[in-house]
Image (spheres, grey):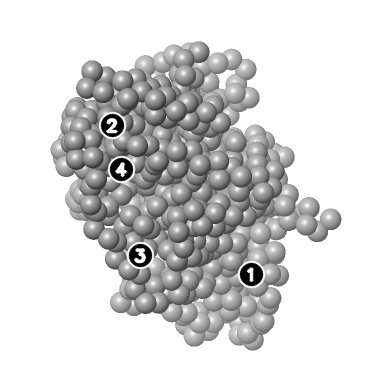
């Protein structure tokens, strides 16, 4: 098999080191690739090359980083530190070449890939949308370990380097250039010629390019950054705090000593539970992208015509978000509602969503404008007879949805798929009566649709493999990752999450302050506490779903009384940035709303609870309900549950997933 890294010398004595793993769609720095790269560097040194260009033959990937499978297999901190030192030595070999080295980047240049680029003399990146550059390691619970913290802080200064490293985000080429991560941005068609021109120019100038010295760290910079991390879970903060330590200490010593310190801290972190859990989460996300219907149907689904035109019924928040998402991904969309004013507001919201996508670099202005044109709004049914799929996103009422599906069945073609965006109602209760029930399916999007990757693909009693396969292919075209569920009340995420939220309200009703409850769960690692989440979802929406859970799980779910009382008093939560619920939201600030909420309850004296007890009680409710979902075959695996709550509910990734956390916790108490 061809080598994953090759070296060649062109007619102008410019050496080309090209990454192109023949066994994979991506280039990763595994042991085989590193050995091949080392051999290419050795060949370079004896080739007589005047300059060297490092690049990739892949269309969308430069180097995606280290092989996480190898990283996960490291047995302890000593092995992880040695892994770091080996990578540092390899890039030192690159850095020490006697000729100038230009890195020509097109596609993802992440982690170890960018650390390789930092060891080069000059970095050119393309302005292609697939080019993303940076150091995301802190997001994996570790730090850059192949020289990234040391070289970047020496290149652009400690403040800018830590600003990038702590965000753990990849940047488009233009943003990377502004920060100093790359030196030039060029179109993909000109990348090779531009890289060669720079390489020859540097060779003629004897390689020297004088860079301005990076700014000296401002007084108090490192301590200020540490202070910003004084809240939140301590385990989650280990990696960012270590990055600060390594950059601060590394600037006080020579390069070799700084790299040694980086390797030590990398080893400690990479062998820790948080990093191992983050790697587990990465593989969960990758597996979700490749989800199949295996185990759900006896026979594989045949190849069916793709979905091209979609009808969306309901122009509220969810219908609007769904319509924009579909149009952004090339679908013709017909959006219907009975109120023209609502459609006008929806169309304006869709415009804002497209503008935001342009601002965030997700879409070009031309793509956004074309997407907006693809959305047609109507108060009638014109256009629905030619739809391949219709998604209802109306009020969460079984009676209203049944009425709608009856009407739709008489309008759409017999082979058109009929889908519900319901978050909790079983499909058989809302669409089990329609002709050709085999075409009925659930497509549960999560809010905000434009940003949430999770979708629940709900299989009704009559759903066929053909329908499910067509829907699964549709989900993939949207860039979403599905969890497949059997139709049952609440499916997976809503069911488990609202058992948890209801239990949190029970604690509040027993006198535990809202801030105490929410602080405990934020300390656990949730992005927000359960009562704050109720305000975000809407107290009225929460109470509606509490009612559904009480109906379907009578005897196991006892609906708390507080949310209904709050709705009656006009306390519906945040609702677009204003209003009141468990908290008050005024001028962009939030504060506890205890006086207004406590008077709705039967005066319970404030009760003190240990944060660990609060967390244990609420997490146990989630774990127990998730296990019941597994026993009832609502989903097929613990991995499905873990991914769903990571992607759809914000479960802390450093814990690896709800069920992984449950196993860890139980092992601790054995």
Residue, disc 1: 506
In whole angstroms, how far apart are the C-alphas of marks 3 and 2?
32 Å
Answer whether labels 3 and 2 touch (C-beta < 8 Å): no
Instruction: Kindly state the secondary structure of the residue where label 4 is placed.
Output: loop
- Callout 3: 10 Å neighbours few (<14), some, many (20+)? many
> Looking at this view, is 241 or 277 the one in front?
241
In whole angstroms, how far apart are the C-alphas of marks 1 and 4?
61 Å
Give the mark nearest the N terminus, 4 or 3: 4
Pair 3/2: label in front: 2
Give the mark nearest the N terminus, 1 or 4: 4
Q: Where is residue 6 in the image (x, y as percent from the top left)?
A: 40, 21
Residue at 19% across / 28% down in the picture?
193
Q: Position of residue 317 (x, y in %)?
A: 33, 52
Residue at 69% across / 43% down in the picture?
75
Q: Can residue 485 be seen in this view?
A: no
* Rendering quarter of residue 639: top right
- Callout 4: 10 Å neighbours few (<14), some, many (20+)? many
Residue at 42% across / 63% down in the picture?
251
Q: Residue 51's mark?
A: 2
Answer whether labels 1 and 4 touch (C-beta < 8 Å): no
Give the mark nearest the N terminus, 1 or 2: 2
Residue, disc 4: 121
Q: Position of residue 413 (x, y in %)?
A: 34, 21
Residue at 49% across / 53% down in the picture?
256
Instruction: Kindly state the secondary structure of the residue where label 2 is placed.
Output: strand
Residue, disc 3: 159
Answer whether labels 3 and 1 touch (C-beta < 8 Å): no
> Looking at this view, is 443 or 517 the one in front?
517
């Amino acid at each position: 098999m061809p080598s994953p890294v090759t070296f060649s010398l062109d007619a102008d004595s410019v050496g080309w080191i090209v990454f192109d793993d023949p066994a994979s769609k991506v280039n990763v720095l595994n042991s085989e690739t590193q050995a091949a790269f080392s051999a290419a560097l050795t060949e370079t040194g004896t080739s007589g090359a005047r300059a060297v260009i490092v690049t990739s033959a892949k269309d969308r990937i430069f180097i995606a980083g280290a092989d996480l499978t190898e990283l996960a297999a490291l047995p302890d901190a000593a092995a992880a530190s040695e892994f770091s030192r080996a990578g540092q030595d390899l890039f030192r070999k690159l850095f020490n070449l006697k000729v100038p080295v230009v890195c020509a980047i097109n596609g993802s240049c992440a982690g170890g890939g960018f650390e390789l680029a930092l060891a080069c003399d000059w970095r050119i990146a393309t302005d292609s949308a697939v080019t993303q550059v940076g150091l995301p390691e802190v997001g994996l619970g570790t730090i850059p370990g192949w020289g990234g913290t040391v070289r970047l802080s020496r290149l652009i200064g400690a403040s800018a380097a830590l600003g990038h490293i702590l965000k753990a985000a990849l940047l488009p080429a233009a943003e990377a250039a502004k920060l100093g991560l790359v030196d030039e941005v060029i179109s993909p068609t000109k990348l090779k010629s531009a890289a060669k021109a720079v390489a020859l120019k540097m060779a003629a100038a004897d390689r020297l390019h004088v860079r301005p010295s990076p700014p000296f760290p401002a007084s108090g910079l490192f301590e200020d950054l540490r202070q910003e991390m004084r809240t939140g879970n301590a385990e989650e903060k280990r990696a960012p705090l270590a990055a600060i330590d390594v950059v601060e200490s590394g600037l006080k010593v020579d390069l070799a000593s700084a790299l040694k310190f980086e390797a030590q801290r990398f080893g400690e972190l990479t062998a820790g539970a948080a990093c191992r859990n983050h790697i587990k989460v990465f593989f969960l996300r990758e597996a979700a992208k490749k989800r199949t219907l295996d185990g759900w149907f006896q026979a594989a689904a045949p190849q069916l015509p793709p979905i091209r035109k979609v009808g969306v019924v309901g122009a509220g928040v969810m219908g609007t978000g769904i319509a924009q998402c579909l149009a952004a991904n090339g679908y013709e969309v017909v959006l219907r509602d009975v109120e023209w004013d609502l459609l006008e507001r929806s169309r304006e919201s869709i415009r804002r969503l497209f503008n935001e996508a342009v601002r965030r670099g997700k879409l070009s202005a031309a793509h956004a404008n074309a997407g907006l044109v693809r959305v047609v709004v109507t108060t009638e049914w014109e256009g629905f007879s030619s739809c391949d799929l219709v998604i209802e996103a109306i009020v969460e009422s079984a009676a209203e949805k049944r009425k709608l599906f009856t009407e739709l069945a008489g309008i759409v073609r017999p082979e058109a798929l009929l889908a519900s965006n319901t978050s909790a109602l079983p499909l058989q209760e809302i669409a089990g009566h329609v002709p050709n029930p085999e075409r009925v399916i659930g497509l549960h999007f999560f809010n905000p649709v434009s940003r949430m990757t999770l979708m629940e693909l709900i299989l009704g009693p009559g759903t066929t493999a053909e329908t499910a396969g067509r829907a699964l292919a549709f989900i993939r075209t949207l860039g979403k990752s599905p969890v497949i569920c059997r139709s049952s009340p609440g499916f997976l995420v809503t069911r488990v999450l609202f058992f948890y939220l209801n239990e949190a309200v029970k604690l509040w009703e027993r006198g535990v302050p809202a801030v105490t409850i929410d602080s405990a769960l934020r300390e656990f690692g949730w992005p927000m506490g359960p009562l704050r989440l109720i305000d975000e979802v809407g107290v009225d929406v929460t109470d509606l779903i509490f009612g559904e859970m009480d109906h379907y799980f009578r005897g196991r779910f006892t609906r708390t009384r507080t949310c209904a009382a709050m709705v009656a008093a006009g306390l519906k939560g945040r609702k677009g940035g204003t209003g009141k619920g468990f908290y008050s939201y005024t001028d962009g600030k939030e504060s506890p709303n205890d006086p207004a909420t406590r008077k709705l309850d039967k005066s319970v004296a404030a009760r003190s609870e240990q944060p660990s007890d609060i967390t244990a009680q609420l997490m146990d409710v989630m774990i127990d309900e998730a296990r019941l979902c597994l026993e009832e075959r609502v989903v097929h695996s613990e991995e499905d549950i873990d991914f769903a709550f990571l992607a759809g509910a914000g479960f802390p990734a450093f814990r690896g997933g709800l069920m992984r956390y449950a196993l860890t916790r139980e092992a601790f108490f054995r």
